[in-house]
Amino acid sequence: MRRFAIIGHRAQSSGKLPLNDLASGAGRMDVLIRALMASLMTSHGFRRDSEIILHLWGGPGPKRRLKIVGSEVKGIHAEERSIAGQIAKVLREPVPPIGSWIKRSSGIYDGGGSIEETIREWQNSTIIALDANAERLWSENTTIPMVSNPHSFDSSDDDEVVIDGIDIGFILSDDKTLELDDSHDIIKRSIGQTWLQGHMAIGICHFLIDEGVTLNL
Ligand SMILES: C[S@@+](CC[C@H](N)C(=O)[O-])C[C@H]1O[C@@H](n2cnc3c(N)ncnc32)[C@H](O)[C@@H]1O
């Protein structure tokens, strides 16, 4: 399973989302939507072994989390404005209490809380905070395999969703640096010395997992 958490320090968490002003008025909601697309979508469909939690910290009101689950999601298209429309519907609802996820539509869950709750929910995952200044995410001297051998993959049948392989969670920030409490069992890893946009960083994580590059965990 591949999990992504992205922090939107200024991302609007409640009220009427300005669909024509996602970058500014909505507090860089465009960044979060691109991260959502990169986490869940391939060229032709959804990654069923992936999910993302958007952390909306910009108010008004309490922080909100939106979880979008690749194996369940329907009615989402690779187009920023249509995804913003789905988010807008959720933001009109009150923020649920911390600890509960309310299903708002197929594969879209609405919850309260912060990154601390996400880390707690990911207790069975290896958690990586992505940081360009850290050690590399891949092992020294590893090579890129010539045949794809994914670390995580979907083996579902018609009756049940089955995800095999590693369970790994990545935490990313937006344009602001995220300070994480050192007490958590989280490792920092880099995908190169150049700071990339969040959605590109997610794409590289998928590439490494898709191809089965040996990871430095
Ligand atoms: C636009 S960058 C944020 C840059 C911001 N100046 C900072 O200091 O966090 C968005 C996120 O993508 C991830 N990221 C970008 N480039 C990366 C890299 N080379 N290695 C690891 N993570 C990266 C980080 O999680 C980062 O918080």
Image (spheres, rainbow, N blue to C red):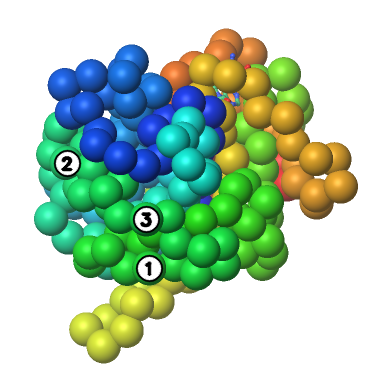
Above or below, 183 against 29 in this view is below
Which residue corresponds to mark 2? Answer: 85
Marks 1/2: CA–CA distance: 18 Å
Q: Amino acid at mark 3?
A: Pro
Q: Which of pointers 3 and 2 indicates the residue nearer the eye?
A: 3
Residue lying furthest top: 194
- What residue appears at the point 30 percent right and 40 percent down from the top-left corner? 15
201 displayed left or right of 74: right
Q: Amino acid at mark 1?
A: Ile
Sequence order check, earlier mark of 1 and 3: 3
Numbered mark located on residue 94 in the image: 3
Q: Is mark 2 within 8 Å of ligand 1?
A: no
Whole-percent x, y for residue 142 in the image:
65, 35
Circles 1, 3 touching at the beta carbon (< 8 Å)? no
Q: Amino acid at mark 2?
A: Gly
Number of marks drawn = 3
129 displayed left or right of 135: left
Whole-percent x, y for residue 122 in the image:
62, 61
The local secondary structure at tag 2 comes to: helix
Q: Can residue 7 be spotted in the picture?
A: yes
Sequence order check, earlier mark of 1 and 2: 2
Residue 81 position by quadrant: top left
Q: Which of pointers 1 and 3 indicates the residue nearer the eye?
A: 3
Whole-percent x, y for residue 46 in the image:
25, 53
Q: Is mark 3 within 8 Å of ligand 1?
A: no
Numbered mark located on residue 102 in the image: 1
Along the line of sight, the residue nearer the viewer: 14 or 53: 14
